[in-house]
Structures are given as C-alpha cells and as structure tokens.
Image (spheres, helix red, strand yellow):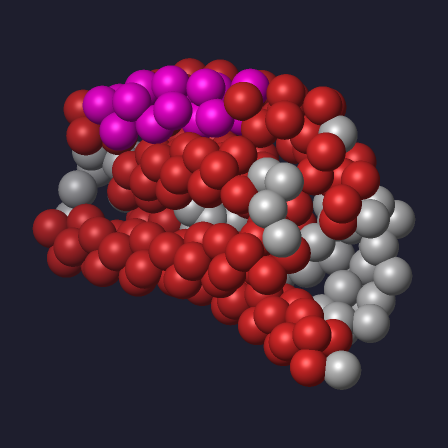
Amino acid sequence: MDMGCSSFFYESAAMPCCHDSCCPSSISPSTGQDDPRWHRALWIALIVNGGFFLTEIIAGVMADSASLQADALDFLGDTANYAISLTVTGMALAWRSRAALLKGGTMLVFALWVLGNTLWHAWSGTLPHAETMGLIGALALLANGGVALMLYRFRSGDANMRSVWICSRNDAIGNLAVLLAALGVFGTGTGWPDIIVAFIMGGLGLHGGTQIVLHAIAETASTKMELAG
C-alpha cells in the first residue's frame, strides 16, 4: 500500500531530481510502457501480491499482529496498484499520471487506516504470536524482494512506473520490519515491537503516498503546459 509504497529513503541518491518534471528519465515513457518485460513484471507482481494479501490478512488476524495486518493491507493496495497500471499501460501520459494520482491518494487512505488500527492494538494491549509473524514475514520478504528486482529497471520511468517501483521496494522494507518486530515480540514478551513497526509502516505509507501524489501533479501540470504551448 503503498503504505509500504513509501519510504523515508526516497531515492534521493539514485534520482536527485525525480520530483522535478524536467528530470530526465533513463526509460522514456512510451518505450517503457510498450516493453513486454513491463507487462510481464506487472502480471507477476499482481498475482504475488494478491496471494500474499490473503495469506497475511488471515495470519495477521490469527496472530493478533498489527504489523502483519498492516503488511496485508499493503499487499491489497499494491494488487490494486498493479491492476491500475496494467489498465493504463499504453495510454497517454496524462492518463497514466492520473492513475498515479489515484494510487497515491489510495496509499494515503490505507496508511491512515493502518495508523488507526495500530492505535487500537496499542490500547487493547494485544500480544501477537511471534512465530507466525516471523514465518509469514520471511515468505513475504522473499516474494517482494523478487518483485522489486523485476521492477528495478523501471524505477526511472514516468509517475505511474515510479509508483509501482516505490511500492515494491518499500514492501520489501516493510517485510524486513515485520521480521524485526517478530524478534522483538519474542525477545521482550510484549506487543510493543509489533506496535512500533506498524506505526513506522503507516508513516512510510503517508510519506510515499505524498511523494507519488506530488510527482503525479507535477507531471500532469507539465503535460498541460506542453499541450497549451
């Protein structure tokens, strides 16, 4: 969800001007969108994320884990993300920018839900099942790591392609955080490591959603200026 679709490590080194509409892309929007590898990667990512959403939401409820539930919602958001990206593939840049804007807004909504759910767990004092968290988190990390590697080549594309890359990359970071939370719960015998990680994931979602929305708005404005000119 990009909830997981966010990061405080927002590619400042790899793409120092990615927020700027004049920033050159290593993959042109038209070429990238027509690339069969882009289509194939999106379909694989869609299937993987849809499957892991079901897995994690069930495991998260059974384990009473806020971070697993946050990660599950992230998978759901990304499934919708990839579906939208497949729908707008080949369309004009303006439509792809609007799709990125929609996805960024959705990420913000999901992030707010995660933060609210985490507050409820903190208030209730739930103690999650560390072993379940660790097992599911490890499997999700392997899945998301593979998807992120597939999408790495498209990280410098348009706002739509970039939003897909950000989601995948930060999902892997979120999965690693769930593993750390599982270790913390196991070591301390309290639910606070789970709560802290869920809060961080919610914060990452707010950050990433904001970045995608800003990039999409800049891209849309640039397209309108070109048409007006």
Q: Which residues are magenta?
A: 44-59
Horizontal and vertical percent position of residue 214: 57, 72
User: With 25 as the anchor, is 229 left or right in this view?
Assistant: left
- Observer able to see residue 117: yes
Considering depth in this image, is 182 or 70 the residue closer to the camera?
70
Residue 190, relative to residue 212: is it above or below? above
User: With 177 as the anchor, is 66 left or right in this view?
Assistant: left
Residue 49, relative to residue 32: is it above or below? above
Question: What secondary structure do most residues of the magenta stretch adopt?
Answer: helix
Residue 65, relative to residue 43: is it above or below? below
Q: Residue furthest left?
A: 124
Horizontal and vertical percent position of residue 151: 69, 33
Tell me if residue 57 is in the magenta stretch. yes
- Observer able to see residue 193: no
Considering depth in this image, is 118 or 166 the residue closer to the camera?
166
Considering depth in this image, is 146 or 174 the residue closer to the camera?
146
User: With 69 as the anchor, is 165 left or right in this view?
Assistant: right
Exactly how many numbered labels are in the figure? 0
Residue sitting at x 43%, y 58%: 102
State the image quarter where residue 40 is shown: top right
Tell me if residue 46 is in the magenta stretch. yes
Residue sitting at x 76%, y 45%: 30
Horizontal and vertical percent position of residue 50: 38, 24
Residue sitting at x 63%, y 26%: 39
Horizontal and vertical percent position of residue 86: 53, 34
Residue sitting at x 68%, y 59%: 10
